Amino acid sequence: MPAHRPGSTRGAISALIGVLAALLAMTVALPGSAFAAQGEGDKAIPHPEQDWAGSQILKHEGGSTTGEQPLGLLATVEGVDVSSHQGNVNWATLWSSGVRFAYVKATEGTSYTNPNFTQQYNGSYNVGMIRGSYHFALPNNSTGAAQANYFVDHGGGWSKDGKTLPGALDMEYNPYGATCYGLSASAMVNWIKSFSSTYKSRTGRDPVIYTSTSWWKTCTGNSAAFGGINPLWIPRYGSSVGELPAGWGFHTIWQYTSTGPTVGDHNKFNGAMDRLQALANG
């Protein structure tokens, strides 16, 4: 029988440690692990500049891309929504074309702020528009409360000045993975409730919810919990709004095209100018 030498045992252990270290390195390098490796509330966002209200809707749901105004809606108030995707915006041109309100992307998750926010938010205000800001939600990134607080702290606040719309929560398809961000329907509803209640406690206003009927059905189980509380901003690129998510008897804002003049995304407020002002005033 060969002699058992202590040195050979140490060598075997060292080799085993080396193998385990290599396996661990491979695991860390697997696709998607970078998103999970960072701490709560500080997760990497790969391309926030490519995420805006509706950026995932057309990819998943399609629709008309003509940019033409829907028939029968010419009397409602025209609006736009913008993000860093548009860069600095020519607000004077939009005002001259009849645009009277705007939503500007402020934040995404708990680490991204729109670098063009000041020009877009103040520029729309300076030409006379009523404007508000919106937050692109990443429900698997951090809690609803954390994202609501980040939003309010970085441009998502509200003031009763007749020119500021309540902040909006953009709930749409995950640009980085699973459609519903890996959350169950009940967990998603709770996440939205957490964001909404935190936003209201900070600002006194219920946030507008931006979402499509298809995504809402898939990811919240078509929850009716928000229809009597949060105004609805619905994207549908065609000649009519169509079916609404459960709980809402009417929409407040309709994003009807992603290829409109000057900035792409154009919206219709469901009412006359005095009702838009009432929404701003709370």
Image: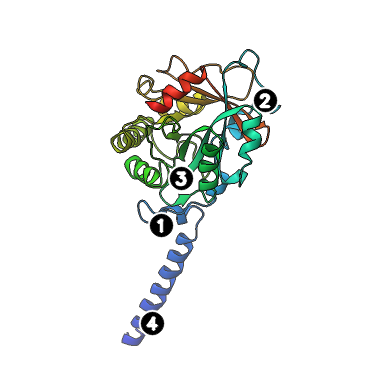
Element at label 3? strand
Q: How many marks?
A: 4
Comparing labels 3 and 2, the label whose residue is closer to the camera: 3
Q: Earlier in the sequence, mark 4 or mark 2?
A: 4
**On the image, numbered disc 2 is attached to which residue?**
64
Give the image location of residue 276, x and y in percent.
Answer: 47, 23
N-term-proximal mark, 1 vs 3: 1
**Image vertical order of residue 140 relative to residue 239, above or below:** below
The earlier-in-sequence mark between 4 and 1 is 4
Q: Amino acid at mark 3?
A: Thr
Q: Position of residue 36 (x, y in %)?
A: 41, 53
Q: Which residue is mark 4?
A: 11
Determine if residue 230 is in view.
yes
Residue 282 to residue 74: above or below: below
- The colour scheme is rainbow
* Residue pointed to by mark 3: 107
The image shows residue 278 at horizontal and vertical percentages of 42, 22
Q: Callout 2, which amino acid? A: Ser
Label 1 amino acid? Answer: Ala
